[in-house]
Image (cartoon, rainbow, N blue to C red):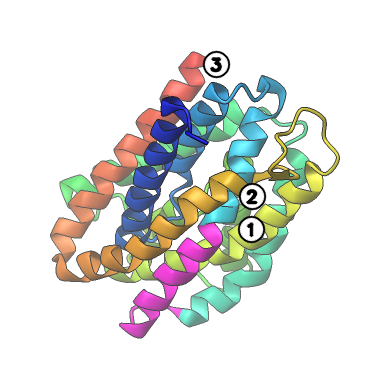
């Protein structure tokens, strides 16, 4: 049976978006949710999926795709010895707790507030990275004890509410505390694994039995979206890792600063568009 041209076009868009997402994951240590969520949202709209489930379906599917993408990216950075594994261990439990708390708060808190917070923090860090100044740093080293774990909880909380893998937020925190951009990117790739696994499971459970979902969905995760996005993201993630380590510190700072500004613009558009 011949497939309709619009279905073929949507499939091609998702495959290409997946390839770009994988490169972003490798270069910047992010999960790519800032790119995947709007693409999936528009694709689901063309597929006539009701507005009542479009956004959570896009977020849940994005988190599911981030799982293999982040694992591939993390392993690539780990092989190059760039990951702060001690920091990951310290953040593991607080991040997972933050993800679960965020899933509960998301029912009541306005996402606009959280998006606005992210835009402010990410915007400041983007300007810092692009300008090359160290005046905006909070400190020259990461804190210890409760403050360090509180940062982990904050990463999980904001990521859960905003539907992203957490790499952007972890990158911001680490670079504002004097960590080099290469180590921040590498360690942030591991953050995506910690956030996406409980996040995707949570969206599956939250959407279980929900009306108006497409036939391919398991809860708020579209198996079709997962099947089209995941292969190309995994294939290109290692390419992004190689690209990240081939760039000088200054070039990577500039690239990530520009990337953060683009993400800020995306969230500002979401706020303005309502």
- Residue 71 drawn in magenta: yes
Residue drawn at x 52%, y 33% is: 115
Q: Quadrant of residue 35?
A: top left
Q: Which mark is residue 153?
A: 1
Mark 3 and mark 2 lie on one chain; the one further toward the N terminus is 2
- Depth check: give the residue in front, 34 or 215: 215
Please say if the residues under marks 1 and 3 sit with CB atoms less than 8 Å apart.
no
**Local crowd size for mark 1, using a 10 Å CA cut-off: few (<14), some (14–19), many (≥20):** many
Residue drawn at x 59%, y 69% is: 91
How far apart are the two marked residues, 3 and 2, measured between alpha carbons?
22 Å
Residue drawn at x 53%, y 54% is: 65
Q: Which mark is residue 88?
A: none
Tell me residue 153's x, y (percent): 64, 58
Q: Is residue 142 above or below residue 127?
A: below
Image quadrant for the C terminus?
top right
Residue drawn at x 59%, y 65% is: 194
Q: Secondary structure at mark 3?
A: loop
Tell me residue 38's x, y (percent): 47, 32
Residue range of the region highlighted in magenta in the rendering: 66-84
Q: Secondary structure at mark 2?
A: helix
Nearest to the eye among marks 3 and 2: give it: 3
Q: Which mark is residue 157?
A: 2
- Depth check: give the residue in front, 74 or 101: 74
Tell me residue 28's x, y (percent): 33, 58
**Local crowd size for mark 2, using a 10 Å CA cut-off: few (<14), some (14–19), many (≥20):** many
Q: Is residue 84 above or below residue 63?
A: below
Residue 209 seen in the current view: yes
Please say if the residues under marks 1 and 2 sit with CB atoms less than 8 Å apart.
yes
Mark 1 and mark 3 lie on one chain; the one further toward the N terminus is 1
How far apart are the two marked residues, 1 and 2, measured between alpha carbons?
6 Å
């Amino acid at each position: 049976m011949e497939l309709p041209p619009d279905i073929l076009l949507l499939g091609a868009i998702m495959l290409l978006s997946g390839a770009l997402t994988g490169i972003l994951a490798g270069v910047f240590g992010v999960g790519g949710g800032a790119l995947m969520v709007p693409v999936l949202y528009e694709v689901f709209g063309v597929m006539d999926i009701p507005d009542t489930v479009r956004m959570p379906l896009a977020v849940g599917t994005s988190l599911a795709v981030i799982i293999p993408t982040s694992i591939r990216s993390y392993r690539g950075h780990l092989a190059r010895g760039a990951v702060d594994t001690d920091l990951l261990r310290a953040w593991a439990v607080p991040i997972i707790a933050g993800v679960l708390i965020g899933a509960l708060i998301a029912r009541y808190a306005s996402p606009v507030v959280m998006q606005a917070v992210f835009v402010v923090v990410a915007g400041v860090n983007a300007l810092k990275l692009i300008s090359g100044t160290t005046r905006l740093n909070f400190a020259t080293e990461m804190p210890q004890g409760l403050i360090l774990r509180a940062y982990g909880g904050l990463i999980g909380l904001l990521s859960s509410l905003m539907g992203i893998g957490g790499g952007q937020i972890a990158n911001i925190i680490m670079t504002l505390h004097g960590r080099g951009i290469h180590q921040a990117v590498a360690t942030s790739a591991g953050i995506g694994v910690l956030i996406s696994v409980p996040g995707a499971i949570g969206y599956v459970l939250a959407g279980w039995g929900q009306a108006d979902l497409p036939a391919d969905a398991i809860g708020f995760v579209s198996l079709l979206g997962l099947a089209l996005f995941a292969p190309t993201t995994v294939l290109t993630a290692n390419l992004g890792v190689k690209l990240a380590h081939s760039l000088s510190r200054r070039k990577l700072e500039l690239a990530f600063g520009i990337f953060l500004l683009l993400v800020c613009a995306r969230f500002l558009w979401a706020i303005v568009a309502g």
